[in-house]
Image (spheres, grey):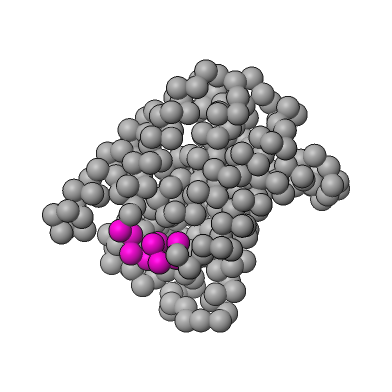
Amino acid sequence: MSKLEAFILGIIQGLTEFLPISSTGHLYLGRHLFGLDDAGLFLDTMLHVGTLLAVLVIYKNELLQVLKNPFGKLSMLLVIGTIPAVIVGYLFSDMFDSISKTGVTIGWEFLITGFILWMADSIKNGAKKMDKISYGDALFIGTFQAAAIFPAISRSGLTIAAGLFRKLDRETAAYFSFLLSIPAIAGGIILQFGEMVSGHTEAISLSSLFIATLSSALFGYMAVVWMINYLKKNSLRIFAIYVWILGISILVLQITGVF
């Protein structure tokens, strides 16, 4: 993997982790484009470390609040919102790993992501702010997050959509989605490190890994800030159209045997 490829993959991860268009699906396509299909687990782990660093910086005050009051409402919202993904990941991890490696379903998954985004954007604007989010809201949003274990189902897209379905205002839906990503990304990194310790990992230069991680962190930071501001006044439908075009293109390429 060249340094330029590492930089581009970092951009892809950083942007698509927080834009509602699926980071895993785009990384699969990016690696396939560069012929890096074998550069999987170690690279993915470090790319996710980059995006984790981005949200840790942005949400440092909220995390300090959680540490100071581990049984407070914010802490409980994050715990409740994370439980569905933990359960689904534990029960079906092998099946989803198999699906992710083949990429056979990603075209359909992009289409599903677009459909959910379009439907959520049709919901009349809610008015709930962070202080009005209930434990039921957190569980509902967390259940949508659990569905994002499929490679091309967008985690940020589904959690933002779920927030809109629960009548959060658009800015708060994005804000809580990204806050909820912290335990999700951190948990995924821990599992990936465990797999690397017990199995085979790819040989990738430290300089390429550093560039990929830094790029992921920088573009992830920009994506979070931009997305929260974007949703204050703008629609999700542009993202729905994008993933529909991408999904249809992939299906056509699969049918014709090109991809």
Q: Is residue 4 left or right of residue 95?
A: left
Q: Is 66 in the magenta?
A: no
- Quadrant where the N terminus is found in the figure: bottom left
Give the quarter of the image for residue 113: top left
Please report the residue visible at 47 percent of the width from the left and 78 percent of the height from the top: 201
Relative to 124, does residue 183 appear above or below in the rendering? below
Q: Is 101 in the magenta?
A: yes
Please report the residue visible at 62 percent of the width from the left and 35 percent of the height from the top: 175
Q: Is residue 167 left or right of residue 66?
A: left
Helix, strand or loop: magenta stretch: helix
Please report the residue visible at 62 percent of the width from the left and 57 percent of the height from the top: 86
Q: Is residue 209 visible?
A: no
Count of all numbered marks drawn on residues in the image: 0
Q: Is residue 135 left or right of residue 200?
A: right
| Foreground of the two, 111 or 213 | 111
Q: Position of residue 165 (x, y in %)?
A: 55, 29
Q: Position of residue 115 (x, y in %)?
A: 38, 34
Magenta part of the protein: which range? 96-104
Q: Position of residue 102 (x, y in %)?
A: 33, 64
Please report the residue visible at 60 percent of the width from the left and 39 percent of the height from the top: 141
Relative to 3, does residue 170 appear above or below in the rendering? above
Q: Position of residue 125 (x, y in %)?
A: 55, 19
Q: Is residue 104 visible?
A: yes
